[in-house]
Amino acid sequence: QVQLVESGGGLVQPGGSLRLSCAASGSILSIDFMAWYRQAPGKQRELVGFILSDDNTNYGDSVKGRATISRDNAKRTLYLQIDSLKSEDTAVYYCNAMIRAYGGPLKKYWGQGTQVTVSS
């Protein structure tokens, strides 16, 4: 069974930074595309950014210039750092990955989400 588990959320002051992690576990053959999404109360889920297997990255306009996505393939872990946090960054952050499990097809998986609140 493949799982994605996020960690690192919490309460952060405006102007501060956060670093989220997303660890993949299970019977994994390979991990391709990995991404971070977020969903604020009353809003649709939006793409924060993604990283490809060749480490190319792309970011949503709302975090461009403030966010860095990276991955450690040996640890099967995805990271998100956002600097200069604003109240508008308050949301539940989800990781998403295209994973091929042993004996299975390439499939999209989601983590359970981690709450980030930016407030003084």
Image (cartoon, helix red, strand yellow):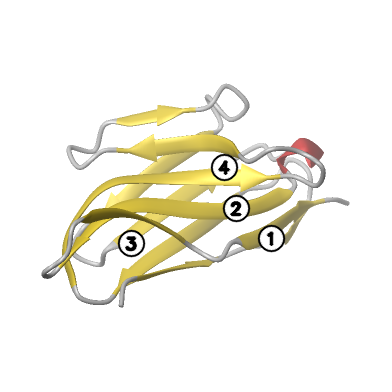
> Label 4: which residue?
82
Q: In this view, does 47 lie to the left or right of 50?
A: right
Extreme-right residue of the structure: 120
| Residue 20 vertical position relative to residue 88 in the rendered view, above or below | below
User: Could you tell me how far apart the alpha carbons at marks 2 and 3 are, in whole angstroms?
Assistant: 15 Å
Q: Mark 4 or 1 closer to N-term? A: 4
- What secondary structure is found at the residue carrying circle 1? strand
The number of callouts visible is: 4
User: Could you tell me how far apart the alpha carbons at marks 3 and 4 are, in whole angstroms?
Assistant: 17 Å
> Which is closer to the viewer, label 3 or label 4?
3
Q: Mark 3 or 4 closer to N-term? A: 3
Q: Mark 1 or 3 closer to N-term? A: 3
Dividing the picture into quarters, in which one does residue 54 lie?
top left
Q: Mark 2 or 1 closer to N-term? A: 2
Check disc 3: other Cα within 10 Å, few if <14, some if 14-19, many if 20+. some
Q: Which amino acid, by three-letter code, is at mark 2?
A: Tyr
Residue at 11% x, 69% y is 103
Which label number is shown at residue 88? none
Q: Which amino acid, by three-letter code, is at mark 3?
A: Thr
- Front-lying residue, 70 or 46: 46
Residue at 54% x, 44% y is 37
User: Could you tell me how far apart the alpha carbons at marks 4 and 2 are, in whole angstroms?
Assistant: 12 Å
Residue at 70% x, 56% y is 116
> Label 1: which residue?
115
Query: Residue 83: x percent and y percent?
Result: 60, 40
> Label 3: which residue?
77
> Label 2: which residue?
93
Query: Residue 75: x percent and y percent?
Result: 25, 67
User: Could you tell me how far apart the alpha carbons at marks 4 and 1 are, in whole angstroms?
Assistant: 14 Å
